[in-house]
Image: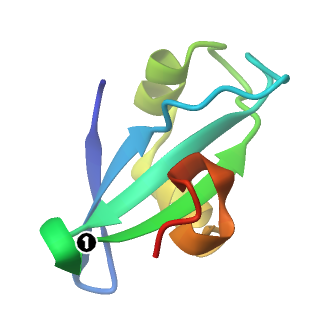
Amino acid sequence: MPTRSIEVDGTTWTVTPSGRFTQFTRDEFTMLFTRGTGPDRVQRVAKYAPLGARSRELSLAELTDVQLRGLFAHSQPSWTSPDTGYRR
């Protein structure tokens, strides 16, 4: 899966498409923002509707860093999302 990295408030987050599909297969995607590894890992989830490509990978490549930061600003903690299995 493709990954991107962005910096938000001095912290680097890795951005990847979620592996989970909804009934809106090509109209809505979920991006996972991850910081850290192992037990210290923090994940946030953001859903968005792509304006260009309808493939998760191509859509991620089309997003600018500013757009990714905007998605991050509207993201929710992992424990509130089925995309991450409601993990804390």
Residue 43's quadrant in the figure?
bottom left
Which of these two is toward me, 88 or 44? 88
User: Would residue 5 appear left or right of 29 to someone viewing this image?
Assistant: left
Q: Which of these two is toward me, 46 or 5?
A: 46
Q: Quadrant of residue 55?
A: top right
| Relative height, residue 71 to residue 83 (above, below) | below
Name the residue located 30 percent from the left edge and 24 percent from the top edge.
Answer: 1
Report how many numbered discs are placed on residues in the image.
Answer: 1
Coordinates of residue 40 in the picture (x, y in percent):
20, 80
**Where 39 falls versus 14 (above or below)?**
below
Q: Is residue 23 left or right of residue 79?
A: right
**Residue 45 coordinates in the image, percent (x, y):** 56, 59
The residue lying toward the viewer, choosing from 38 and 16, is: 38
With respect to residue 48, does 6 lie above or below? Answer: below
Image coordinates for residue 63, horizontal then vertical, percent: 50, 38
Residue linked to disc 1:
41
Q: Residue furthest left?
A: 37
Q: Residues within 10 Å of mark 1 (few under 14, many from 20)?
A: few
Q: Toward the viewer: 18 or 68? A: 18
Which of the 4 image quadrants contains residue 53? Answer: top right
| Secondary structure beneath label 1 | loop
Identify the coloring: rainbow
In the rendered view, does 9 fall on the left or right side of 67?
A: left
Residue at 67%, 19% (x, y): give it.
52
Residue furthest to the right in view is 23
Q: Amino acid at mark 1?
A: Arg
Residue located 47% across and 31% down the image: 60
